[in-house]
Amino acid sequence: MFRLSAQSTRKAVQRLAVQARHQSTSSATASSMNAKNVSMAAAGVVTVGALAYFSMESVDANMAADGLHPPAFPWEHKKSLATFDHAAIRRGYQVYKEVCAACHSLDRIAWRNLIGVSHTEAEVKAMAEENEYTDGPNDVGDMFQRPGKPSDYMPRPYANDEQARAGNAGALPPDLSLMIKARHGGADYVFSLLTGYQDPPAGVEIREGLNFNPYFPGGAIGMARVLYDGLVEYEDGTPATTSQMAKDVVVFLSWAAEPEMDERKKMGMKALTLLGILTGLSIYLKRHKWAGLKTRKILYNPPTPKKH
Ligand code: HEC
């Protein structure tokens, strides 16, 4: 009797132990599952947060330090199917030549680059010849001066950076060839900069020799306002307002920064058209080839037992 009860108690304890062990293992998996879910969710939140952070424009950045964010202007050449406005490039070149070239170089543009873009070959030859270039050495080892050729690059206003700084109260007028690509905001920024000069607001001190421009990071720029209504006389009769000249010179500089844009868009159009036709053809051909297979019906006729 006693032995029996002892045995059954032992069994019961064993059962309990097994149960407990089972429970503990299952709850362990459950808690590890929970931890996994929590870490997955945390990783998700971090990823979404990082994406949002990096894709946001810094519009709410410190305006005084980073400059006022320029508005987005509807540039014709930024439309995906549009080319540059070549009349604007021609006018913009005139503004660069008559205004900006006094201080800014345009090192990456040669005279020949203008041929067929804004000027004819004869015009470009004549414009290049107006400039003297140092060439040589000649037979006796001396450098000599000669008139420019279309293969020469645009002349620089200053012999070196030191001279450029000395002529502009210590500020270096940067080369404008790639300016549109070099600045955040590109064409919008340069247009806003050229048209954004104004009196400094109350309480803002601008050092002697600097000028207030809210679009320039820091607000104080070494370049004074250079464009004023009627400064140049366009040969096509376009009224030379400040904003018109700014727009034209920005279109010219956009071309200078990306002379291959028209060609690039044309190639893109050709490629897309061709690939579109080929895609249509291959879809048709695929369906044509597969039609027989897809619509066939497989029948099984069981052999009929032969009648004797
Ligand atoms: C009198 C000389 C002078 C003339 C003319 C001039 N600039 Fe400047 N420009 C400067 C100087 C100096 C700087 C450098 C300013 C600085 O770093 O504070 C500058 C800077 C610039 C910048 C760069 C701003 C930046 O974000 O760093 C652009 C763009 C620019 N000029 C465009 C033009 C254009 C376009 C014209 C013609 C319409 C022009 N400039 C005419 C002297 C000139």
Image (tube, grey):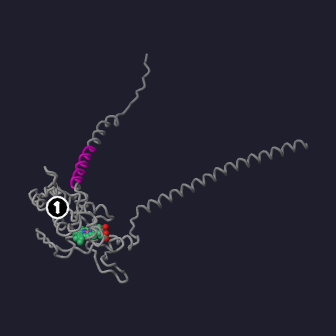
Q: Disc count in the image? A: 1
Residue 71 visible within the image: no
Above or below 37: residue 162: below
Residue depicted at 19% across the width and 60% down the height: 154
| Ligand 1: quadrant of the figure | bottom left
Q: Say which of 150 and 296 sits in front.
A: 150
Q: Which contiguous range is marked in magenta?
A: 262-280
Q: Please tell me whether the stretch drawn in magenta is mainly helix, strand or loop.
A: helix
Residue sitting farthest toward the right: 1
Q: Where on the picture, by quarter, is residue 294?
A: top left
Q: Is residue 3 left or right of residue 192?
A: right
List x then y, in percent, for residue 280: 27, 44
Q: Is residue 72 magenta?
A: no
List x then y, in percent, for residue 100: 21, 68
Q: Where on the picture, by quarter, is residue 104?
A: bottom left
Residue sitting farthest toward the bottom: 202
Looking at the rendered structure, the secondary structure element under dot 1 is helix
Residue depicted at 38% across the width and 74% down the height: 64
- Image quarter (top left, top right, bottom left or bottom right) of the C terminus: top left
Kind of residue at disc 1 = His
Above or below 227: residue 304: above
Residue depicted at 37% across the width and 83% down the height: 203
Q: Say which of 282 and 135 sits in front.
A: 135
Q: Is residue 134 left or right of residue 200?
A: left
Q: Where on the picture, by quarter, is residue 246?
A: bottom left
Residue sitting farthest toward the front: 140
Residue under numbered circle 1: 86
Residue depicted at 40% across the width and 27% down the height: 301
List x then y, in percent, for residue 233: 13, 72
- Image quarter (top left, top right, bottom left or bottom right) of the N terminus: top right
